[in-house]
Amino acid sequence: MRPNDVFSIQLWSTRTAGSLAEQFAYLAGCGYTDVQPYKDLYSDPAALRAMLDEHGLTARSGHFKFSMFEVDFDHVVASAKTLGMTLVAADWLDPEERPVDRAGWEALGVRLAAVSRRLAEQGLQFAWHNHEFEFTPLADGSCGIEHALGGEVLWEMDIGWVFKAGQNPLPWLARYAGRVPAIHVKDVAAPGEKLDEMNFADLGEGVMDWRLYWQAAVDAGAELMIAEHDAPSDWRRFARVSAQAMRRLASSAT
């Protein structure tokens, strides 16, 4: 599978819609063929799968809160398999759960690796999804993300959050090439702009050079590109504009 074969969108971006049926009909009309559910959508995986099938959509990946992998593992696996997922990602740590030093991040990395190996036995890939807090420099100058990923955990890189953390995404993509199966495609507005949308922008309308990042992601081995906006003021506008931008980016990649 190549990144221009499937265009996906994280359903957190469209959560203000009246219903999933409304979201799926609109997203399919925009040209998306895949969606990425999040932790609140797994109460009835069979019903969700039926709705996806009805609208000609797949869910190749999904987000789950990390605690779900450790305390409700069977439900995560059953949900993923019912929905046809091949990749599951841990997407968040509450502030009180976040490590504060290298030892803490290394301990988290051990837990992530254990989850990854356990899921591999079930035929599922596991990845960590980042925000900005993983890039806060530690006392030795390293970043938490390095210790969380260790030598084996895959990374669903949210390039927008990497950028907002003040990092250049390109060296990170190069460093973890072969371990980045999916990318969150997110754009950032100019400083001081779109504050009602957390300073994020629709894809192609922010300050990020997404032609450069898209190609670098392809070169790093990413197979699934997932549009996301954490707080769009108009989810339909975001979905439509971003789908158009993703098609342009895919057509220009080599």
Image (cartoon, rainbow, N blue to C red):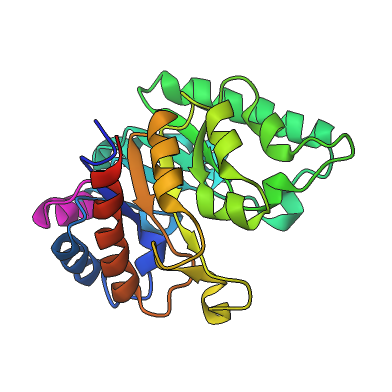
Horizontally, residue 129 falls left or right of residue 203, namely right
Find residue 193 and report its image quarter.
bottom right
Q: Nearer the viewer, residue 104 or 140?
A: 140
Instruction: Inspect the magenta stretch and tell me whether residue 58 lies in it.
Output: yes
Name the spot of residue 54 as percent of width and height, x first. 10, 56
Horizontally, residue 139 falls left or right of residue 13, namely right
Quadrant holding the N terminus: top left
Q: Residue at x 49, y 26 (%)?
A: 179
Q: Residue at x 47, y 40 (%)?
A: 89
Quadrant holding the C terminus: top left
| Magenta segment | 47-59
Find residue 119 and report its image quarter.
top left
Q: Nearer the viewer, residue 223 or 48?
A: 223
Measured along the vertical axis of the image, is residue 207 above or below residue 161?
below
Q: Residue at x 83, y 31 (%)?
A: 103
Name the spot of residue 48 as percent of width and height, x first. 24, 54
Q: Nearer the viewer, residue 167 or 76?
A: 167
Q: Residue furthest right?
A: 139
Is residue 75 at all visible to an observer of this figure? no
Instruction: Inspect the magenta stretch and tell me whether residue 75 lies in it.
Output: no
